[in-house]
Structures are given as structure tokens and as C-alpha cells.
Amino acid sequence: MQKDPPTFTLSGVVLDCPDPRELAGFYERLLGWPRVQDEEDWAKIVPRSGGTGISFQTEPHFTAPVWPATPGAQQTQSHLDFEVADLAAAVAHAVECGAQLAPHQFEEDCRVLLDPVGHPFCVFLPGA
């Protein structure tokens, strides 16, 4: 058995979607991160300070997940979490960029939103 595992660096998270360029545009507006890859079936944005980015790839059979989970429906297999300083301002900005506030909210200091193709993401206050 190997003593030390090989080094892994998380390069990004990949979201499947019908149109990568369109969804990348939403997250560019939301986060202010620049696009570093822009192809027909693939786009990627990264924080200006570097680090882990978000990629978007074409999935022609994409089905939006249901939030909250419902038996028999497409399940959310992951979601993005963003810490924010001002919850109300973050929600208003996200909605202005094209997100929708999810109809079900479970915590006072966290809000679940849905991106334009239905991926849930959370914005939350520090310490939440």
C-alpha cells in the first residue's frame, strides 16, 4: 500500500447544462469571475484571485433537478455554496442576474436559489 497518495488539486466543479456559454454567462454576472475557456460545448470561469473554478458542459439530455428532493424525480447530486456578507443583497443580485429564489427555504441565515437551468445553489452568512 502506498504511504502518501498522489497529489490531487481540485481544478473545478462541472455543471451539465443545455448551453454552457449561456450558463457560464449567468455565473459570470453572479460572481464577477472571468471566463477562461469558451467553446461550443464547454466553458469555464475562475475567481480573479485564482483557485477552483466552475466549468459548464453540454448535456443534450439534461433534466433539471427538483428542489427539494422528491421521490421519482431528478435528484440534485451536488450544489454550490457561496458565503456572502449580506444575505438580502446577495439574493437580490442573484435574482437580478437570472436566478430564482427556491420556493422551499429551510434556514434563516441561508437561501436556496435556482440558476437559470434549475441547479440549486446556496448563499449563506458567515458561521451558518
Image (tube, rainbow, N blue to C red):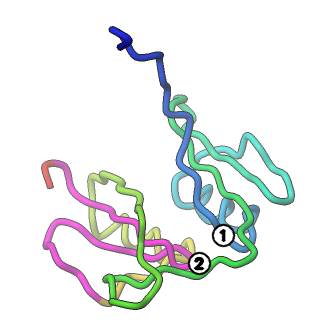
Which residue sits furthest top? Answer: 3
Image depth: mark 2 or mark 1 in front: 1
Side of 73 where 33 appears, left or right: right
For the point 42% across and 84% down, the residue is 66
Judge the density around disc 1: few (<14), some (14-19), many (≥20) Cα neighbours within 10 Å.
many
Residue beneath disc 1: 17
Q: Is residue 51 left or right of residue 21?
A: left
Q: Is residue 99 above or below residue 14?
A: below
Classify the position of the C terminus by image quarter.
Answer: bottom left
Q: Nearer the viewer, residue 121 or 31?
A: 121
Asked whether residue 115 is drawn in magenta, I would say yes
- What's the residue at 36%, 82% (across, down)? 67
The amino acid type, in three-letter code, at marker 2 is Val
Pick whichever, 10 or 104, lies toward us. Answer: 10
Residue 91: quadrant of the picture: bottom left
**In the image shown, does 76 or 104 lie closer to the viewer?**
76
User: Quarter holding the N terminus?
Assistant: top left
Q: Which residues are magenta?
A: 104-126
Q: Position of residue 52 (x, y in %)?
A: 51, 36
Q: Rounded to the nearest whole Å, what is the CA distance between mark 2 and mark 1?
A: 7 Å
Identify the image quadrant of residue 114.
bottom left
Quadrant in the rendering for residue 92:
bottom left
Which residue position is annotated with label 2? Answer: 117
Badge 2 marks a residue whose secondary structure is: loop
- Left or right: residue 121 compared with residue 104: right
The residue located at (38%, 11%) in the rendering is 2
Task: Please tell me whether residue 122 belongs to the stretch shown in magenta.
Answer: yes
